[in-house]
Image (cartoon, grey):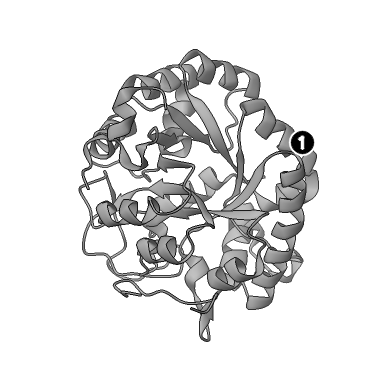
Amino acid sequence: MQQTMKLEAGDKGGTSRREFLKMAAASGAAVPFLIESAAMSATPLNQPIGLQLYTVGADLDRDPIATIKRIAAVGYKQVELSPLAKISNADLKKALDDNGLKNPSGHYMLFDLLSNLQQKIDVAHQFGQQFMVVTVPWVADPSRFKTDPAAGQMGMFMAVISGLTMEDWEWNAEQFNKIGEEVKKAGLQLAYHNHNFEFKDFGSTTGYDEFLRLTDSNFVKLELDCGWMVVAGLDPALYLTHYPDRYSLLHIKDFKKGFTPRTSLMDKNPNPPVPTELGRGAIDYTRIFAAARKGKIAAYFVEQEPPFKEMPALEAIKVDYEYLKNLKD
C-alpha cells in the first residue's frame, strides 16, 4: 500500500473558525454535515460523548454560563473549545469545572500558533487540554492574494483556501512539523482538522494526502471531520482503516440525503449539503465507528452546523446525544 493515496467513497480497499463557518452558512454554501459512569460503556468507542462548542455558539454568546449548564444537563461529559470572545478563559474554565465537563481538545488558527505559540500553549494548559487542533491551513505570503478590502479577513480566508497550491501544502506540512515538535515538548499534541477543500485533486494525489505523507506522525495527529470528508465524496472508514495511528479525534455530524459531493467551499453548485441532526441524514456511522474502534481515537465530538431550521441548537444537541448513546453495532 502506498503511503499517499486518494481513497474514494465506496472503495473497498484573528477571525475565528467559528466566524468563518458562520459566514459560510449565511451564504447558503455547503456547510458540514457529519469514563465516569456505567452508561459510557454503551456509547460508541466506550468513551464519553463530547460536544464541539461551535455547535451552540449563538447560545454561548447570549448566556455562556446557562449554556454550559444546559450542555451538561443533556449528558455530555466533555467539550471541545472553539475561540470564544464573550467570556474570559478563567470564567469559562470555572463553568466547565462546576458542571463536570472535561476539555481534552481546543481549536486554534495556524497563523496564531506561528506568531504566538507559547501563549496558546499556556491556554491549552489552563484548560487541561491534551490536543491543540488547527482548523485551517495558511500560506507563507498572504500578500500574494489580492482581495477586495470590503471583504475583510473573510475575503482573505476564502482567497487562501481557494488558491492553495501543492507548494502551499508542503509549506504547511513543514510548519506543522516544527510547531508540533514544540507542542510535544510542552506535553501536548498538535493535530489538524479537515474540511472538504483539502481533497481537491493535484494530479494523482490531494493536498490532504500529501500533508498526511509529509507530516511526522509523532508531532502531527489528525482530527477526522467525518461530515466534511463525506462532503468531499470520500469515505471516513477507509481513511481510519488505512491510517489507524494518525487519527486521534473525530467530529460527528450529518447531512440530509441528496447532496452533490464537492471539494470547494461556498460554491454555487446545485444540491448543497443541508445540515441535520445525527441519524436523520446520509452518513452511516455504524461502519465509521467500527473502523475507528480499530484505531487510537482519544475523543470524539458532536458538531452540528448551522443553520438550525427544524429546532434550536440546544434541542438539536439532545437529538444528537441520544442518537450516539443508543447507536448499536
Residue 298's place in the image compared with 78, above or below, is below
The answer to which of 68 and 248 lies nearer the viewer is 248
Q: Residue furthest top?
A: 98
Q: Is residue 102 left or right of residue 39?
A: right
Q: Is residue 119 left or right of residue 297?
A: right
What residue is at 33 percent from the left and 51 percent from the top? Answer: 289
The answer to which of 145 and 31 lies nearer the viewer is 31
Residue on which the image places disc 1: 119
- Could you tell me residue 48's position as x and y percent? 39, 32
What residue is at 64 percent from the left and 53 percent from the top? Answer: 153
What residue is at 62 percent from the left and 28 percent from the top? Answer: 128
- Could you tell me residue 161's position as x and y percent? 57, 65
Whether residue 69 is visible here, answered yes or no, is yes
**Amino acid of disc 1:** Gln
- Could you tell me residue 206's position as x and y percent? 53, 75
Crowding at mark 1 (Cα within 10 Å: few <14, some 14-19, many 20+): few
- Could you tell me residue 16's position as x and y percent? 59, 44
Q: Residue furthest front?
A: 294
Q: Is residue 305 left or right of residue 210?
A: left
Q: Secondary structure at mark 1?
A: helix
What residue is at 67 percent from the left and 41 percent from the top? Answer: 188
**Splitting the image into 4 quarters, where does residue 87 fall?**
top right
The answer to which of 144 and 259 lies nearer the viewer is 259
